[in-house]
Image: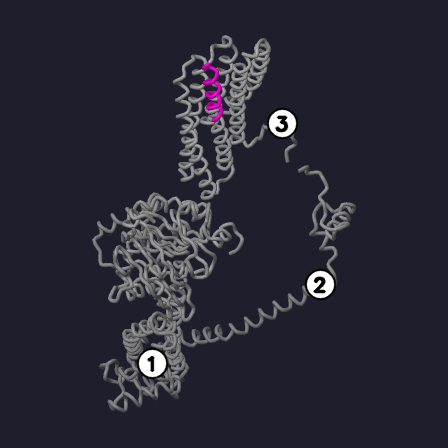
Amino acid sequence: MRHLDAELSQLKEKLLAMGGAVEKSVEHATQALLLRDLSRFKEVYALEAEINRSHVEVDNACVNLLARQSPMAADLRLIIAVIKINADLERMGDQAVNISHNGEYYLAWPELKPLVDIPIMAERVRVMVRAALDAFVKLDEKQAQLVLECDDEVDQLKQKIFLDLLGVMKQSPENVERGLNLILVARNLERIGDHATNIAEDVIFALNGVDIRHRGIARP
Amino acid sequence: MTSSENSNVILEADKIHAWFGSHEAVKGVSLSAVMGTVTALIGPSGCGKSTFIRTLNRLHEEIPHTRVEGQVILEGKNIYERGVDPVGVRRKIGMVFQKPNPFPSMSIFENVAAGLRLAGISKRSLLAEVVEQSLKQAALFEEVKDKLKAPGTSLSGGQQQRLCIARALAVKPPVLLMDEPTSALDPISTAKIEELVMELKKDVTVVMVTHNMQQAARISDKTAFFLMGELIEWGDTSQVFTTPKVEKTEQYITGRFG
Amino acid sequence: MDDKAPRPSGGSGPSGTTFVRMIRKQTPQPRWGGRRYTRARLSLSDVKRRWVSRFGVFFLYCLTFLAVTPLLGIFIYIVNKGIPGLNRDFFVSLPKPVGETGGGMGNAIVGSGILVSLTSIIGVPWGILLGVYLSEYASSRLARWLRQCIDQLSSIPSIVIGLFAYAMIVVWTKHFSAWAGTFALLIILVPIVARTTEEILKLVPQHIREAGLALGIPRWNVTLFIVLKGVRGGVMTGVILGIARIMGETAPLIFTAFNNQYGFSGLNQPTASLPVQLYTYAISPFEEWHQQAWTGALVLVGIVLALNVISRILFKKSEVRRD
């Protein structure tokens, strides 16, 4: 086996561990909100520190690999994908923290309304994150396509939640703060979905060198 | 360098100067190698890196009209001390050269056994054992085990170079010097030698001159950059190649001169 | 980028090659390629050039033939003249007095064998060691000086060497002897062996020596068991050529080993040799001796030729090994 292969698989493992932490973090944040369990937010903050540490580590490892191994072709695409996925994962971690902040605020008040669409959306996003990471581990294009398909659904859910909450907020000024927090939660979930989409796109790039982002643009 | 690393220093050059006639090719270089690491010496042609490495096993003085000043401390002893026999020094510091140079009209077996045999060991079973072990260490045994009696020069360039590595390893030196060991080889053979070096460092400390920066980046733990006979920068390879401290190093490794 | 898009040319307007390409596109080209096309247009100067070349090559053939002819001539002539006297007696019998038929050059063949063997036993190791010293150890100034001396020595006419050996040994011991002959032949052999050894050792790349030294092998060991052993074929070639040379030397032996019609009788005694015997017989007025001389010449040429061929084979072998 090439020396580079060993280093690449180490790098993948590191990134995967980070992905696991992000997945858990998103899970804890949404579950805390849905189950009204404040203790789970602490987990999110703890994971955030871990994710940040991994973020730096993976970046350093990538810089070292690029500088020392002069990777080419598939190896090069993989490392570039890892760099981008790393950034996406870190942002996802941040979104989970944001959800926690909004959630803590929201839970400090009595319930505004029974949550219906947010749990659905959270479940969808969770599936997306899991599928994106799976696609990366197995370098599996099918899984990556699955993520891309989920994205539209999540966007629509967010739109629906926005409209619903706008209606509730218009009923009474007292509803505005809680409504806004729930809107922000939905928005952060949608962002997490977007990052998962980015990951899926990067996996496809790493896999066969095809850039499927921004389809309107003419490519050289 | 931290003190814990310091205790594992196996080879240390202290203010080495080397001359060819009146030309000073190495101007006061101090450098040390930690046990079980690969140190790469890089720099443009004529920067003194090859001359420097040849002072480490007292080979420089074999060229007429040359001179060396300074100390090289191998396992705590200065090899340039008065009364030290260079022959003994060289048995502890192996060397592999730029061009594969198996001894002419010697078989593969004889080549690897040469160092031991000429040191007075003639017991056939012992020689056979060491030859096999050294060839295995040099990742050549599988390719040549059925033709140990064939001339060493009948092998391909890359195999010859691994034969030379096996020959150097046979006398079990704690340090192995390599002077551009892959510059005469094709990419596949080069990759094999690189893999080999990374394997070898478990058993032997490697100091290697290379004109190939990627090679230094790939396989070394420490990198030293030479320019005009001086040591410009020396540090962890990842540091030297990502954030060099000296402007000259940056310019060289980014290909702006040299 | 779109492959069909026209490539932008460097300057304004079509460049030279673009222009040619444009013209080419318009002129139909023969499908069977440019070769026939150019041949049809062979210009007058091309025709002239070809003839000059043919003539030059022919001229060189002639010169080569002229150079080889004498060799073949001599060989055929000697074989022709020598064969009649070639029989078993020639090799084993002693010369018969004038007037008697039969007899041979047994004394001279044995004598030559002894002289050449003795010279080789002493001279070959001496020459090789001298060559090794010159190539491996002598400082460049001393080596240059020694080399100069050796070259001068080998250009001294062999008759002068014979005279010198006579003055040094024969005058001192007051009689001709095999030793005196050996002394003279040594002066010829040692420089040849030394210089060829040196030249061959110089062919061994420096990094082979360094590889040996770097293994912690003492220098004299590297020289003898790695460097010299590696080119032993080449060195042997030099040695055999040197032996072939002294085999045929006459002049140094006339005043030293002299001659002996009664067979070998000790190293302190005059000793016969093929060339001297040949010389003596050839200048004699007797017809039977002339026949003997021709046969002797044939044997001598045969031996020297055989030695040369052997050396060539050895050298070829060593060449193959080195690659």
Q: Is residue C47 left or right of residue C71?
A: right
Membership of A96 in magenta stretch: yes
Q: Nearer the viewer, residue B182 or B50?
A: B50
Q: Residue A137, image x and y in percent?
A: 45, 27
Q: Residue C100, image x and y in percent?
A: 32, 84
What amino acid is found at the position of numbered circle 1 in the picture? Ile
Q: Nearer the viewer, residue A163 or C257?
A: A163
Q: CA distance from mark 2 to mark 1?
A: 58 Å
Query: What is the magenta range?
Result: A94-108
Q: Residues within 10 Å of mark 3 (few under 14, many from 20)?
A: few
Residue at 75% in and 48% down: C24
What amino acid is found at the position of numbered circle 3 in the picture? Arg
| Residue receiving disc 3 | A215
Give the mark nearest the N terminus, 2 or 1. 2
Q: Nearer the viewer, residue A139 or C86?
A: A139
Residue C130, located in which quarter of the rendered image?
bottom left
User: Any mark on residue C187, and which?
Assistant: 1
User: Any mark on residue A46, and which?
Assistant: none
Residue at 45% in and 13% down: A34
Please state the chain letter of the residue tagged with numbered disc 1 in the rendered image: C
Q: Element under label 3?
A: loop
Membership of A210 in magenta stretch: no
Please state the chain letter of the residue tagged with numbered disc 2 in the rendered image: C
Q: Residue furthest left?
A: B123
| Residue receiving disc 2 | C47
